[in-house]
Image (cartoon, grey):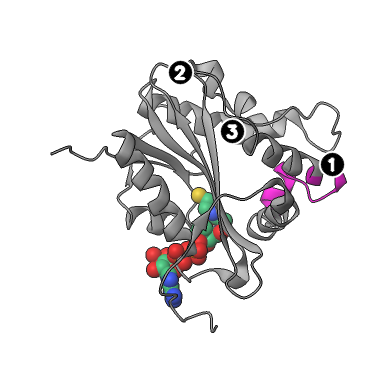
Amino acid sequence: MASTDRPTTVVVERPTTSDIPELVSIWWDAFGAEAMQRIFPQTPDGRRFIERSFEKFLGPAPGPGELKTECLIVRSPDTGVPVSMAIYHVVPAGCSEAKRSWRARWPAFDDLSDLNDTVLNDFFSPMEKAHNHVVGDRGHVFLETLATKKDFQKRGYGAALVRWGNDLADQLGVECYLDASAIGKPLYEANGYVEQNVSAIVEKQVSASMLRPKKHQG
Ligand SMILES: CC(C)(COP(=O)(O)OP(=O)(O)OC[C@H]1O[C@@H](n2cnc3c(N)ncnc32)[C@H](O)[C@@H]1OP(=O)(O)O)[C@@H](O)C(=O)NCCC(=O)NCCS
């Protein structure tokens, strides 16, 4: 299929642990820029961290009051290999800051010497501050990551994954939140997200804080 052909339907599904090598490949393809490699290095340690992250995201359902993670993919219609993925967290109302922090969402990496705690914290902390400021402890659906392999972009796969989260939030009657890259922002705006002003909270913003209001019932 030519990259400009719009597929009639995009099937969104849950991956299994056997898809993890392909999920790492999507991650590395979409986040391969030099600046991102400083945070998520493309080395054996860096690979282990991303593998471990997906093992955690695909892990058993949490207890009450905990974040529930949902990993979704779109497969290539030709090969069946995952080419686009989203990681969502369903954050229950009243969930503590500690339970929704980046350190709780992502796996431990103290045995992986290529991962640098300061670098990761500098990456996640400003987003976490803005996120806490905008949503506080209200229940919401949080889109942590969205990525489509370069060769499969602009086919509507990213949009289908965003709509999946919107539908979930509407079923739950909650807002959606995400931290947008400049590349992702137009897609989110087209799907109901609105940028929030967090300049009073975060000095040097590298991503846009975006909120999608909850759907009015009735
Ligand atoms: C952002 C990202 C996930 C979008 O994924 P995608 O699968 O290309 O998303 P879509 O195809 O649904 O939409 C992207 C654009 O393609 C357009 N498009 C969708 N289907 C199309 C088609 N068949 N033909 C041409 N254009 C199409 C959409 O209108 C959209 O245009 P816009 O950006 O001007 O609004 C992808 O670019 C990516 O992985 N980037 C690198 C990682 C990143 O920055 N992720 C976001 C972190 S917040």
Q: Amino acid at mark 1?
A: Asp
Q: Is residue 156 above or below residue 120?
A: below
Residue 29 placement, left or right of 129: right
Q: Which residue is mark 3?
A: 124
Q: Nearer the viewer, residue 100 or 189?
A: 100
Magenta-tinted stretch: 34-47
Position in image of residue 177 (x %, y %): 40, 38
Q: CA distance from mark 1 to mark 2?
A: 31 Å
- Residue shown at 64%/39% (left/top)? 58
For residue 104, what is the image quadrant? top right
Q: Which residue is mark 1?
A: 45
Local crowd size for mark 2, using a 10 Å CA cut-off: few (<14), some (14–19), many (≥20): some
Q: Amino acid at mark 3?
A: Phe
- Residue shown at 47%/54% (left/top)? 182
Secondary element under disc 3, as helix, strand or loop, is: helix
Q: CA distance from mark 1 to mark 3?
A: 19 Å
Q: Is residue 121 above or below residue 171?
A: above
Contact flag, marks 1 and 2 (Cβ < 8 Å)? no
State which mark lies toward you, 2 or 3.
2
Residue 97 placement, left or right of 135: right
Which residue occupies the extreme bottom position in the image? 2
Q: Amino acid at mark 2?
A: Cys
Quarter the C terminus occupies: top left
Upstream in the sequence, badge 1 or badge 2?
1
Secondary element under disc 2, as helix, strand or loop, is: loop
Quarter the N terminus occupies: bottom right
Upstream in the sequence, badge 2 or badge 3?
2
Upstream in the sequence, badge 1 or badge 3?
1
Q: Which residue is mark 2?
A: 95
